[in-house]
Image: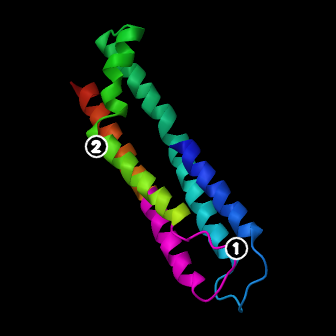
Amino acid sequence: MRAGVLAVAATLLALLHAGGAPAQAPACAKGDFETVVNEAGAALRDLNRQNIPLFQAKLRQLKDKRNWSNDQFLKEAEPFVRDAEIVGYDHKSEALLTRITGGGMTASSTTASDCSLLAELRSAMSLLVGTQKAKWTYMFAKLDRELAK
């Protein structure tokens, strides 16, 4: 997922820089699109940077608490990183990424209509960040419940 988000951000930036001269006076600048992508990318990187080490530490804590072998840990820890709810978050994220990259939100030139694309991009990126936050919240809550047992 992380690699996919970073690839989308790079693709969006490349497409924005590849455009020619605008056909009309721009209502929204390419920099506006870049800012949205950069901010969302930074938020997603920060989420991962903050949550991955803590989540891994809690998984190790559960492993120690349950005295799982390494092989047993791989099997027993899977539901904490992949269950129906987590798959749902991943599908929603993938759908948002498809919408962002395939929905015309990567306009290479700016026109008056691009402002609506910018609003759509901002909304989709915000939903993507929110979905990832919700996924982390869910995963931590599930793990914390197990650690409390």
Amino acid type shown at disc 1? Gly
Q: Earlier in the sequence, mark 1 or mark 2?
A: 1
In terms of secondary structure, where does tag 1 sit?
A: helix
Amino acid type shown at disc 2? Glu
Q: How many marks?
A: 2
Q: Position of residue 73 (x, y in %)?
A: 37, 15
Q: Position of residue 26 (x, y in %)?
A: 69, 88
Q: Residue at x 72, y 61 (%)?
A: 14
Residue 132 drawn in magenta:
no
Q: Residue furthest bottom?
A: 25
Foreground of the two, 109 or 143: 109
Q: Which region of the structure is painted magenta?
A: 103-128
Q: Position of residue 111 (x, y in %)?
A: 65, 86
Picture layout, residue 147 above or below residue 139: above
On the rendered structure, is 113 left or right of 96? Answer: right
Q: Quadrant of the C terminus?
A: top left
Residue annotated with mark 1: 31
Q: Residue at x 75, y 73 (%)?
A: 19
Picture layout, residue 133 above or below residue 87: below
Q: Position of residue 145 (x, y in %)?
A: 24, 32
Residue contact between numbered discs 1 and 2, judged by CB atoms under 8 Å:
no
Q: Residue furthest left?
A: 149
Foreground of the two, 117 or 134: 117
Q: Residue at x 36, y 48 (%)?
A: 89
Crowding at dot 1, Cα within 10 Å, few <14 / some 14-19 / many 20+, comes out as few
Q: Residue furthest right?
A: 21
Crowding at dot 2, Cα within 10 Å, few <14 / some 14-19 / many 20+, comes out as few
Foreground of the two, 66 or 109: 109
Residue annotated with mark 2: 85
Q: Residue at x 69, y 73 (%)?
A: 108
Foreground of the two, 127 or 56: 127
Protein image colouring: rainbow
